[in-house]
Each structure stands twice: as structure tokens, then as C-alpha cells.
Image (spheres, rainbow, N blue to C red):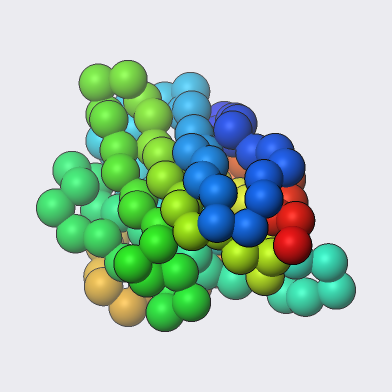
Amino acid sequence: QVQLVESGGGLVETGGSLRLTCATSGRTSNYVMGWFRQAPGKEREFVAAISRFGVSTYYADSIKGRFTISRDNAKNGVYLQMTSLKPEDTAVYYCAASTKDYTSSSVYLISWYDYWGQGTQVTVSS
């Protein structure tokens, strides 16, 4: 059983930056990792994903060019650098891990991930 713990959320003004961290209890290189978010009253949505050794990254159109996903397998960590934040980025951000065979289309799917963290709140004030 893998445990994922997110940190780094908080309150920031429009245009500000935050860096989220996801710490894993297991060997991070075993997993494709993703970030999702859920705003109040909305469904959980894909934000970004990264392949096991960081060769490939995937982003939602809404955050492309503003957010960057990265990983450090030696430290069992996955990161989401968020810049130029907007009020519509306000949400609980979740880290997720998948042990399944990797395909470029599956990383966008909530159901493809096996493990989830508890989430960290990001609030962007206008």
C-alpha cells in the first residue's frame, strides 16, 4: 500500500506562485504520477501527469504554460510548480499514483490511478 501526502498549498494572490509537493511512501519510480484538482461543486479534473522517469509530461489545456510537473525519484517526491495563478485555479489538489502499464491516453483518467493522497487546498484571491 502506497501512501501519498501532499503539501505546499495555501492562500495566494492572483498572479502568485505556489509549489506543491507529493511525498510517497514507496519507491516513486514504480509509479506514473498525476495531479488532479477539485473545485467546490465541480468534478475532479486532470491537471498534469509525468511518466516514471520524467521523460514524458502531460498537461490540461487550462494550465498549460503556467504549471510544471516534475519528479525526483531519489527523494520519492513529485512536484507541481504553479505560476500566474488565477482565481479559477482555486481547488483542492490531489496527488495520484498508478502502477498500471503506461499509455499516453490513460494518464488523463481518474479511474486509471490506484492511489490517492488526501489533498491540499489552494486558494487564489482576486
Number of numbered discs = 0
Q: Is there any visible trace of residue 125 in the rendered image?
A: yes
Quadrant in the picture for the N terminus: top right
Residue 111 % position (x, y): 55, 68
Which is more toward the observer, 15 or 47? 15
Measured as percent of width and height from the top left, residue 96 is found at 51, 49
Residue closer to the observer: 9 or 22: 9
Residue 117 position by quadrant: top right
Seen as rendered, the residue at the extreme right is: 41
- For the point 60% across and 71% down, the residue is 45
Point out the image quarter for the C terminus: bottom right
Q: In which quarter of the image is residue 39?
A: bottom right
Among the 4 quarters of the image, the one containing residue 14: bottom right
Task: Please state if 101 lies on the left or on the right of 22 as rendered.
Answer: left
> Eyeballing the image, is 123 above or below 104?
above
Residue at the spot x=55%, y=56% of the render? Answer: 15
Q: Which of 49 and 67 is in front in this view?
A: 67
Position of residue 38 measured from the top left corner of the image (x, y, whole percent): 70, 64
**Residue 86 placed where, x, y %?**
61, 65
Q: In percent of the image, x 60 and y 31: which residue is there?
A: 7
Question: Is residue 23 shown left or right of residue 55?
Answer: right
Q: Which residue is drawn at 42% across and 45% down?
A: 81
Q: Is residue 119 visible to the viewer in this orientation of the structure?
A: no
